[in-house]
Each structure stands twice: as structure tokens, then as C-alpha cells.
Image (cartoon, grey):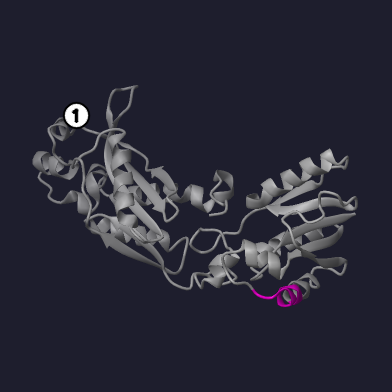
Amino acid sequence: MITVLGGTFSKLHKGHKLMLKYAFNTGNRVVVGLTTDEYLKHNKTYKGFSYSLRKRNLERFMSKLGNDFEVLPLGTRSGNTETNTDYAAIVVSRETMGTAETINRKRISNGLKPLEIITVPVILAEDLFPISSTRIIAGEINTSGKRMKPVRVGISTGNELKVSTLGIYLATIMRNFEVEINSEYELDTNQPFGDETYRMAVKRAISALNERDYGIGIESGIFRESISNKCLDIHVCAVIDRYSRITIGTSSGFEIPDDMVNLLKDGLEESRAFEVLYGTEAIGKHNGVIGAFTEGQLKRKELILESLRNAFVPRIAAGYFGLDQKL
């Protein structure tokens, strides 16, 4: 029984190593199709290393996993997988699963048993984008996925609390990053209601992206719930990355008094409405309305942090949401 996989392996990174470990874990003989120099020349955007060097590095690592393996030249995308009767399984990443499915359709049409498809999760780099040889060769990350230059994260805001809270959150998921404030943005209103909150958060995020890795927009909006007909304050965070993929997260919500809601409908911003009614200035830049309501038990910083964390959930758990696909 043989388990097969193929690739260029220009830079042997964590993703490659995981695929090879999966292959050896099948207990079968492992055959790796290593793309030829000619294939590399016509199918890759970067100038790769020679076949002999790639093979030597590959075999050195594979010898640590087992002895029953072979590395063969691969001149086409599918090699001989469509006709070989000895192959039983194929190891692929999520981004190359389609190739394996095509191979199996050809095998069936050739009267052969389809290969067992073993799908390996894509390994994310520090910046939550997939590790790839292209990125390594470009000097953006190393083979372990560490960023060689800081992850650039922009945020559209004039509120220092949002900026500092973003820095606190990012420090929990990555080490090398820079938060950059974008002050060149326009808002449709000072106090959004309902779905308008999402649109404004996204608008802020897009404005903050520019040529950065990520753009962040955080907006506090008023949402009316249908059970008691009361209004809730909910923070919405939008995250857009350099590939134009948007994820959204919200905080938990808390009720706003009716007299405040009436002032908000008249166009006042929430912190200003609180000031008019209760006399506390610039509350939105500190503990927020929720800090006053709970006497400091819950602060606006915690709601901002919650919305940020929830917006990044699909990125941290990329395999569940399809965000580990080839970019």
C-alpha cells in the first residue's frame, strides 16, 4: 500500500512537515512527487531552488519520520496518480483538495479504485494568513510562520481607548505588529441605529486598510429588541484584511434608558446624551456609559475587547470558516 503526495517544497515549512507526518502516519509506504525544475519554471511565480537541492532537503526531513519512502520527479499536476494501481491514499491540503477529487474521477473512469483523500489543515503564520513558500521566499515570514516585518494594523478612530484596546487584544494573538491610526475617514452619523452600525464599522475598517495587512472599524450602535421593545447598546467590530475578506464581531449588549434614546434620535452621540442628562463629560473616552451604569463593574474597554475578539474568531479558527484557502 502506498500513500502519495506531491508538491514543490521550495522552502520546507511547517505546513509541508505536517503533510509529510500525516502521510507517514498512514503506515503505508510514502511516495512524494517533487515537481521538476521545468514544472517550477512554468507554474510558479517565484524562482525556486533546484530539484536536487529540494530533494535533498526533503529526504533529510523524511528520514526522521521513517525509512519506507521515495521521492520521484513530478512533471504534471497529477503525475501518474490517475493510472497507478499501487496507490491507496493521497495527502492534500484544503487548497489542493480539488486536484485530488479530479484525480479520483479520472481513476474511476479508468476502472480503478479512488484514492482515500487525507486532508491536512493549513498552518497559519503569525499574521493569521496561511504559511506558503511564496511568502517565505518574498521575505515576509520565515519557515515557522514568524513575521519578519511587523503586521500592519490600521484603525479608523479618534478614540484612544479603541487604539489601546486593539493593542491589548493583538498582543494575545501575535507578537510582531504595529497599530496605525487612520484619521482620514467620514461617518454617516454620529450615532448609528441597527444595521447602520454594521455598515459604519465596515466603512471605518475599509478606510483603515489602505496598504496595510488589516483594517479595523469599531462602532457603538443602538439596537431595538422585539421582546420588551427596549434599546440595547452593542459594539460592532469589522475586520478587513489585505485580501478584502471581512469578518464581523459584536459585544454583549446592555439596555439604554428611554430618555437617552430620545436624545439619540434627535442626533446626539451617546456620550453627549449622557452628559446632557447626567452631567458627566467625555464618558465615551473612558469607562463609557456602561461604566457609569454599573459603577465600574463593567467598562467600555471590555465591550470593545469583546467585539474585537469575536471579529477575529473566524480568522483564528480559519479551517472552520474557509479562511485557510489559498490566497
Q: Main secondary structure of the magenta part?
A: helix
The residue closer to the viewer here, 318 or 232, is 318
Q: Is residue 299 visible?
A: no
> Can residue 261 be seen from the camera position used here?
yes
Q: Please give the name of the residue rendered at 48% of the width and 62% of the height, measured from the top-left corner.
A: 127
Q: Is residue 105 magenta?
A: no
Quarter holding the N terminus? bottom right
Q: Read off the magenta span.
A: 49-56
Instruction: Give the quadrant of residue 137.
Output: bottom right
In this image, 154 relative to 22: left or right? Answer: left
Q: Amino acid at mark 1?
A: Asp
**Mark 1 lies on residue:** 258
Q: Position of residue 39 (x, y in %)?
A: 69, 64
Depth check, front residue: 132 or 293: 132
Q: Residue at x 40, y 44 (%)?
A: 249
- Asked if residue 298 lies left or right of residue 44, the reply is left
Q: In this rendered view, identify the residue nearer to me: 47 or 313.
A: 47
Tell me where residue 266 appears, x and y as whole percent.
12, 32
Quadrant assignment, res 29: bottom right
Q: Is residue 55 magenta-colored?
A: yes
Q: Position of residue 173 (x, y in %)?
A: 47, 60
Instruction: Note whether 141 is above or below 291 in the view shown.
Output: below
Task: Name the side, left or right, on which 325 lies relative to 148.
Answer: right
Vertical position of residue 37 compared to residue 159: above or below: below
Q: Is residue 99 above or below residue 175?
A: above
